[in-house]
Amino acid sequence: QLMGVQLYVQHGRLYEPESFKVLQDTKEQSVIRFEFKHDALPPELKHFREMYGYVYITKGVLDYIEVRNEHRFKLRDIEVQKYLKRSYFKRVKGGGYLLSREELSIDGIYDDAPYKERIKGDITEYWDVQGKLVTYSEGVTQRVVSFDDAGYETIAVDLDRLFPLLGKDARKAGYDLPKPFGVTLVNMMQNTVMHMTSFKVDGVDIDFNKVLDGDSTYNNLTYSPLIRADLWVLPFVSFSVILGGTDTTTNVTLVSESGLTIPSIIPGKPDKEIIAPGSSLHLDPFGTNAVLYGLRFTVVGGVGNYFTTIDFQYIVAYTPEADVTIDMMVITPLIGYTFTEYSTRLFVGAQYQRLAQSLTFEIPLSDNQSVSGEVGLLSDEWAGVLGADYSFTRQWSANLLYSQGKDRKNVVLSIAYRF
């Protein structure tokens, strides 16, 4: 973990260019102070917001860079009173410097007891991208470790990764990128009102308005537990697959402004009133279950703490009981602000849901015959969105989204793990 963080420190542009200030400048030594760029610090390095950096140059040659705090802060449940990190450098033949040694000193309070931490390490070898040894100008001291040497442990660490593509360049430019792979548990609750517009039986149009001349509706309350696996293909592009299920309770309301009656088959008996004029009939609610799967494509961008995302989802829901397949398109554009000190993002936006324009059904009869039908449906496609995202660590985060429009309300709670 320390090696991975160190790689980020070396490659990321984490300093604030305007903060450089010369504190001392003599023939023997120059000292320059700088501050860290809060927006560019990843969660693992957020304690660097409490730090200042000091560059020590001895007789024109970079000697070491020192990072130390000026105020107490929390780190891994330690109340840190003094934090001091030094990174020593050596010149390389042909120009430039390589890190040669690191020292870390932490003093504080942990679990109501004094705490001290000391880490020292020497860099023994560097290789270039071709695997050839790169040496310091005065040579490299290599320590060959044997199996009998219990004081050392060899650790293999992958310090760079294929995904996201161009990620290394983005980190060098000072952008904090999430870990490339993610698995998210999504719990969604949505209430949707769908207005009935037409009715067909065996392909024949039924004059719907003559029978039900009001706003008859399907009211669907749906709970959907989902699993989403995603990959950051590029620093600004994520691709996901979605799998889950739905549990839907549907309430059908039939409305007739003129009233609906059935003529009596017995002479002299009054007609049977099904729906009184200007009133409605509520049918018994029924439940359905569906398998849900789909794809998701997300594009992101931002300036400073401000960010914007646009999310495209194509989802298919299959109901085995009725052998019905419904597809939908969901588009969610958002804008927001990141509160880096609290690892929290707040965002607002809108959500477009293109749901099924109709619902088909089939009723089996005797002699292997059946009657098929189709109900035309219409629902307002846009709704407003308000939400927040909180990162517990670089691996774990939670997301809460609330959406409300004319014909629907939606609440989504997500827990994500990244690696």
Image (cartoon, rainbow, N blue to C red):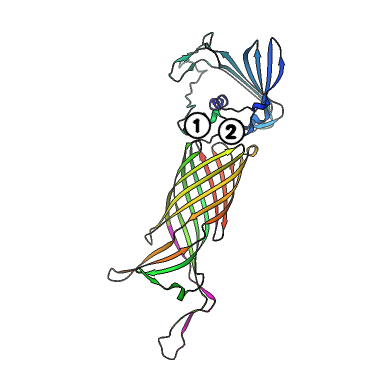
**Where is residue 337, by image quadrant?**
top right
Q: Nearer the viewer, residue 241 or 198?
A: 198
Visible residue check, residue 107: no
Spot occupied by residue 168 in the image (x, y as percentages of width and height): 50, 29
Query: Mark 1 is on which residue type?
Result: Gly
From what the image shows, is residue 369 above or below residue 128? below
Q: Mark 1 — residue?
A: 167
* Residue 178 horizontal/vertical position (percent): 53, 36
Q: Is residue 219 above or below residue 149?
A: below
Can see residue 400?
Answer: yes
Q: Position of residue 21 (x, y in %)?
A: 70, 22
Q: Which residues are magenta?
A: 269-289
Left or right: where does residue 336 sit relative to residue 232?
right
Residue 408: x %, y % from top left? 54, 59
Disc marking residue 42: 2
Q: Nearer the viewer, mark 2 or mark 1?
A: 1
Q: For the residue marked with disc 2, what is the amino acid?
A: Pro
Q: Secondary structure at mark 1?
A: helix
Mark 1, other Cα within 10 Å: few <14 / some 14–19 / many ≥20: many
Name which residue lies at 48% across and 63% down. 378
How many angstroms separate mark 2 from mark 1 (CA)? 14 Å
258 in magenta: no
Say whether residue 226 is left or right of residue 40.
left
Instruction: Name, please, the residue furthest toward the bottom.
Output: 268
Number of numbered tags placed on the structure image: 2
Quadrant holding the N terminus: top right
Residue at x 48% of width, y 31% of height: 166
